[in-house]
Amino acid sequence: MNNSLYALGDKQVNDISLKDLAKRSRYGGIFYLLAFLAAVFSSATAREHLDIIGVFSGCFLLIQFYRLVLFFKVFSSNEIDYPSYFSRYAFIYNSSALVWVSGSAWLFYVNPTIDLAVTVNVMAAAGISIGGVTVLAPSYKIMRSYFVLICFPFALGAGLLLDQPGNMIVAALIIGYGLFIFMTGKQQNRVYWQALNDNLKLSEQAEELEKAKIAAELAGQAKTDFLAAMTHEIRTPMNGVLGMAQLLSMGDLNEKQQQQVTVINNAGRTLMHIINNILDYSKINAEQLELEKISFSPADVVNEVMSLLAPQFEKKPINFTCTLDDIPEFVQGDPYRVHQILYNLVGNAFKFTDNGEISIKAFCQESDDTNTVMLSFSVTDTGIGISAEDQQQIFEQFYQVSHFNPNIRGTGLGLSITQRLVELMGGRISVESEVGVGSTFTISIPFVLSDQAACQESSALGGVGIKPDLPSNLHVLLAEDNKVNQMICEQFFLKLGCSVDLVETGVMALEKFNGSQQYDVIFMDCNMPEMDGFSATLAIRQIEKSKGLNQTPVIALTAHVEEDIKRQCLDSGMNAFISKPFLFEDLESMVKKVRVGLHNEITFKEDSRKG
Ligand code: ADP
């Protein structure tokens, strides 16, 4: 229904404007009554006719009552018949106007002298008509009829019933004033509909934006889930490829075969590096990357990176050095991501340096807060260097400098991920470089200081009472359902001088654990049929507790690399975590740790950190 020259006319608009009208008009009838009483009680002659005053007052009260009834109906019904409601409001306003005008005419009739009573009446009429017109802004039609009914008969009544010559002046005043209010009312009506239109458009746009935002978030989530699922699916067979290639390379091969296996190995590692970079990239972009906050030793992280990369440095005439200035023994933060950052920077340095030197330096900068420390790590190389122009862009996603060197490969994601990780930790990264001379990448990250006690406490989650000082020939229980992985692990363990019992499900692992054989360590796949590794570990920890036994170290083997899975491993009572695909060195270093007494820790080994 078109209630206005400017109405949109659809259901939503009608609904808003009707509710507006109902709200604005719900108490308006009271003012008519008060204004009428003020005017008639100012007149001595009118005061004598209490019965007539009572009739008019009763009419005003009835109309007021009807206003309230309509207000509650409008706000309580779901299905509204708009034309009928607008007619009812037209009735309310027209009858208010008619009762007012009749009451005024009666007053002028019994009190024709232009005195206080008439003045109060005319002033009150001005007030209620301004109020009426304002309230009627949503409906031009009702406003028009109201105006006509209240203005012209009122002016006519004044002209005919009041004493001359003032009657003409009062009538003219009413007409002039009425016309002015009407024009203003029309203006209000236009502004009202314009505002309503704009509001509706804005809320429609906001709704669309919200929908688009939700759709984008869902799409982003779907993309992240897809990537997580895919990387998991790729990791499992990659474990087979890399593990078998490594086993092959340990065998008796001629030079050519050795070269071929090295190619498989390198290609596999590069592939894993790319997959992990893509996973990190998508997590960072979806703002889903969560940082750990645990106590750790920065020196240990640097040493881990050094020892992981050291074998590579034997392939080039490069001197690899490390200087640890006076840095704190323990800080709080995410050691895995610090490790990843350093690994990326040193990995790049190695990639772009043919000979000379690569050095890692760790040092502290002054901090205002005594509880925090600004820890800096710089990685310097004597490699090809980066031009000033490229330095501006190397932190951008997918940016790579063209080197005309087919042996140098990458995704162009490493530095952008590194920069985002540093920034997530509240730090910054910078580069200084000269083409042909070398580069220095420096990261500075604020860390909260931590004491050794806190570090041990946090690293010993459930690790109290772990069997220490184990023999060199460990007896291993391996729970793994994938045949290829079983074969690889078994071979690796045998090469490490360990004896292995193999089971394929969590239930079988429990049975073995409960049997007569004692195990020094359990390597547990997380996803297995019947009972997964988490439940099996929980059950093992309960058995140990009930029997008062020392804890047997449980190391998770999983193709999942998400933080929540790592957390789940620790929560279920596992002590460490190895992600698939793992290499011989990873099992070797874990076995070494188990031998010296393992406390809860998630191994730094992550394939994304392997070049
Ligand atoms: P990628 O994974 O392809 O190496 P990065 O984001 O790690 O991608 O690096 C982007 C580019 O920055 C590289 O292609 C390389 O040209 C340049 N770069 C990074 N580190 C060094 C370095 N230490 N020396 C010379 N160039 C470097």
Image: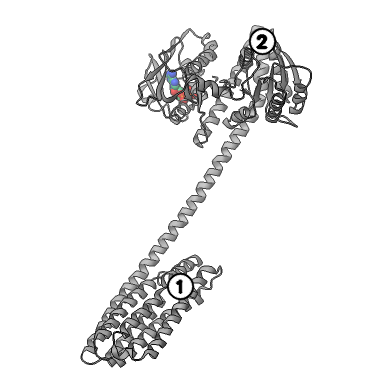
**Rendering quadrant holding ligand 1:** top left
- Spot occupied by residue 338 in the image (x, y as percentages of width and height): 48, 23
**Residue in view at x 50 percent, y 33 percent:** 284
Is residue 293 something one can see in this rendering?
yes
Q: Quadrant of residue 103?
A: bottom left
Quadrant in which the C terminus is drawn: top right
| Labels 1 and 2: the sequence-earlier one | 1
Image position of 560 (left or right of 29) = right
Q: Quadrant of residue 566?
A: top right
Read off the residue under disc 2. 250
Graded by Cα atoms within 10 Å as few (under 14), some (14 to 19) or many (20 or more), the crowding at tag 2 reads few
Element class at badge 1: loop
Residue 49 vertical placement versus 289 (above, below)? below
- Spot occupied by residue 594 in the image (x, y as percentages of width and height): 63, 15
Q: Quadrant of residue 589?
A: top right
- Spot occupied by residue 202 in the image (x, y as percentages of width and height): 43, 57
How far is disc 1 from disc 2 in space, using C-alphas?
87 Å
Read off the residue under disc 1. 2
